[in-house]
Amino acid sequence: MTKANIREQEAYSVFLEDFRPKRATLRNIVVAFLVGGLICTIGQGVLTFILSKGIPLKQAYVLTSSVMVFAGALLTGLGVYDRIGSFGGMGAALPITGFANSVVSPAMEYKREGFVLGVGAKMFQVAGPVIVYATLTATIVSIIKLYVF
Amino acid sequence: MQFHRRGTSTCVFEDMPVVVSAAAVVGPREGKGPLGDTFDMVYSTTLLGETSWEKAESKMLRQAVDLALAKAGLEESDVDFLIAGDLLNQIISSAYMAREYDIPFLGIYGACATMSEGMGLGSFLVGGRFARYVLVASSSHHDAAERQFRYPTEFGHQRPPTGQWTATAAGAVVLGAQGKGPRIESVTIGRVQDYGVTEPNDMGSAMAPGFADTVWRHLQDMARQPEDYDLILSGDLGRIGSVVGRQLLRKKGIVIDEIHQDAGVILYDPSPEVGAGGSGCGCVASVFAGKVWKELYEGQYKRVLLVATGALHSPTACQQGESIPCVAHAVSIVSGDH
Amino acid sequence: MPYVRAFVVGGLLCAIAQAAMDLTKANPAIIMVSAVSMGAILSGLGLYAPLVEFAGAGATIPLPGFGHTLVTGMLEDAAQWGIFGILTGGFKAVSAGLLSAVLFGYLMAVLFNPKG
């Protein structure tokens, strides 16, 4: 038996505490703020442009999302978005451009396994859970909103 | 019958197998690192002109084997066994490499410990007079490992500072019953150690107890002190695991700080992307086959203990909440003129 | 001024997500799932609509905006058709985002190869 018992495991985990490097949390948060803020500002620019063409607000928001998804997808295709992501962390992942990155990166990666079982099957490998839980939560919230309030 | 064993885990050779030749090939990032000029070949792209990461890795491994054979001046028919392993599922890089050679093949998996596991097994075959020459090779490819163990390569995410960067590299050595070169005097096969580390982004901490146990057993079995070695080369503990491993040994009264180096630490210049250092079967394989073998051959090192450490988990096991079992194997090598 | 508001609110949402990831050491997928669910919940509490009013793209571009759009769509249709509106309204509202993701995702996969 070379698997450590619970007591040894706990002792080892305490022992490790001294050696763990601290994450650069403050730096990461500031960078996420800047990168995320910048992406949203670009989005606002797109929105303003679309509105200036006389498109109603609701449709303009929808169109802005599509434009940003396209931008994220293209930057992923060009091999740039993974760098933005490793620099900006959640600042790059949370905007819808990051959502696009999470769809395009597996689609590209698994193309070598074919267009059906590769691209088709793996496209939502990362983004799938987001859609599943967004749908579930939204449904529950809406039902509560309808019947409780 | 007389057994060539000492202590709990160490096998010693009466006729020491010779590491006749060694070859290391690496990808562009490794080529730009501090050890860049110690490798036999540096590729300028990570795809190597192939159509997938997996094919690229297999090609790299084949290249390392070809170079090792050529440097030893041997033909395929001179080699009695080919032992190889890598990180990909079903060790495909090795199998697809082996189909190109007319040599009996043994595929092995020891994660990042594969190289010393292979050299150990190869020494048994040569030392036991079952083979004239044995080829041992192992490889890893950053992008192939990334898509298998983590995320698609173009997915943008931040690496934690404890994470390690899988090296795009391959190393191969030829072991022979005779010839010129460094000789393998003993092999210590490690036991699987699991101290309950569940975080695959912190493999150094998971592997450190395995490393410490194997080094301790080796020194006990051989009745030696760390000073008897010029270098203890661990394979891919990384910056954190190295410190933890040394500290664990210190608790047993063994101080190796001065002579210990880690392949994962010396392969790259520090950067946030690389995190705690390099990892992958190819990391320690290429550092040994490149830098360390040459220095042994030229006599700069008299005795080196190669201790490759492997984290034997899979994404499936980790997602199911399992901790990471780890193993380390030690191979003691003395320079030619010993 | 709308640009500053978009920058600050969008940046803050990302900063909160980053803080959550660094402090809990969770993987990005879990943070993204939590963020989108939080958006839906805040929307239900009536807090997200004012944020969109205030920050525009700064509130709709980050993932919580996706959860908000889903809830808004469901409730809009539900106002007309009752409970069945929940079945029809959600994906109608996010259709453009999802369709673009599939379409452009596929297109890029055809056009480009990963560079590693």
Image (cartoon, coloured by chain):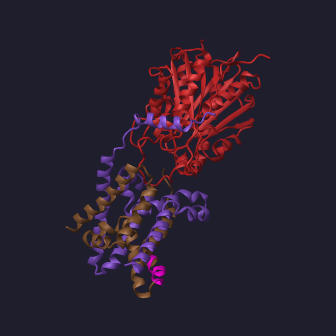
Image coordinates of residue A38 in percent, x first then y, are 29, 59
Residue B35 in sight: no
Which span of residues is magenta-colored? C83-90
Please state which of residues B186 and C107 is positioned toward the viewer in this rendering. B186
Image quadrant holding the N terminus of chain B, namely top right
In the image, is B277 to the left or to the right of A27?
right
Which residue is painted at 47% across and 36% down in the image? B31
Answer whether residue B215 is magenta in the image. Answer: no
Chain A image colour: purple
* Chain that is red in the image: B
Percent x, y of residue A55: 31, 80
The quadrant of the rendering that contains the C terminus of chain B is top right
Q: Residue at x 45, y 73 (%)?
A: A140
In the image, farthest residue toward the right: B1
Count of picture labels: 0
Query: In which quadrant of the rendered view does residue A24 lie?
Result: top left
- Main SS type for the magenta part? helix
Q: Nearer the viewer, residue C64 or A101?
A: C64
Q: Tell me what hue chain C is rendered in.
A: brown
